[in-house]
Amino acid sequence: MDEERLVRAAKSGDLDAFNRLVIEYQSRAYNLAYRFMSDPASAADVTQDAFISAFRGLGRFRGGSFRSWLLRIVVNACYDELRRRKRRPESSLDEFTDDGERLFVEPGTSFSHEGKKPEQEVERSELRAAIEKCLDELPRDFMTVAVLVDIQGFDYKEAARVIGKPVGTVKSRLARARGRMRECLNRRGELLPSRFRLDDETIR
């Protein structure tokens, strides 16, 4: 996809070009919205509103990463909706790999763990549930960077563009988010995923 060409065309009023951008990024935008809204219908509504806002605001896009610009609109749309509801987001994780690393998945993906023992499935399920609860306890700013970096897989620079803050702020918030996640999981007696362990921690 020639993103720059499509963006230029869309800014000139080419709806087909904008629709191609929508198709390219709609799954990622929806997944990000779903992490905040925890409801498929609400996530779909927020995503649609974000794309409408993006189309209307194309004249304000000054170049760079269109994806980051778009996802910042998605994040802001989620915040606006959550403020309207006056409640906190209820983050949800789709899946974690065996060592606790992130695994990005599309909506509706089904999982099959052939060959895994029942007790392993129970452990994975319990860990996912614990991580979800601990994420929900994070302050919203910390949760946002944790979702962007540890779930969506963004690097620091792109996460910074999405939230409109310096890279240093992203790193600081992520470190504090992981620290709180580590403390929360320890309280629950869970084996820590590798990203939440201190550098000198080993599994005993």
Image: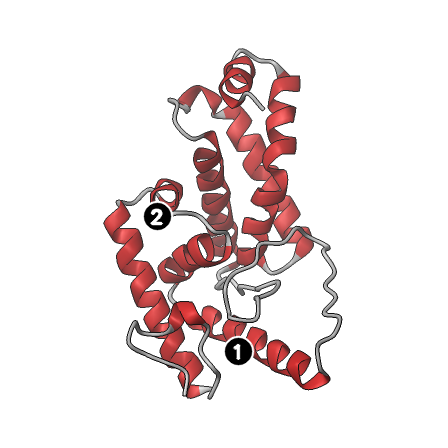
* 173 versus 55 height, above or below: below
In-front residue for pair 35/155: 155
Residue 169 shown left or right of residue 122 in the figure = left
- Left or right for 115, reference 182: right
Q: Which mark is residue 121?
A: none
Residue at x 57%, y 13% (from the top left corner):
13
Inspect the image, locate mark 2, and give the three-letter code of the amino acid beneath it: Tyr
Report how far apart the C-alphas of labels 2 and 1 lie in the structure: 25 Å
Picture coordinates of residue 8, whole percent (x, y):
50, 14
Query: Which residue is labeled 2 in the image?
Result: 156
Which type of secondary structure does the marked residue at label 1 adopt?
A: helix
Q: What coloring was used for the rendering?
A: secondary structure
At 28% from the left and 76% from the top, the residue drawn is 200
Q: Position of residue 150 (x, y in %)?
A: 45, 58
Question: Residue type at mark 1?
Answer: Ala
Lateral position of residue 113 relative to residue 38, left or right? right
Between marks 2 and 1 in the image, the one whose residue lies nearer the viewer: 2
Question: Is residue 88 placed above or below 49 in the rendered structure?
Answer: below
Q: Earlier in the sequence, mark 2 or mark 1?
A: 1
Q: Which residue is mark 1?
A: 130
Left or right relative to 70: residue 107: right
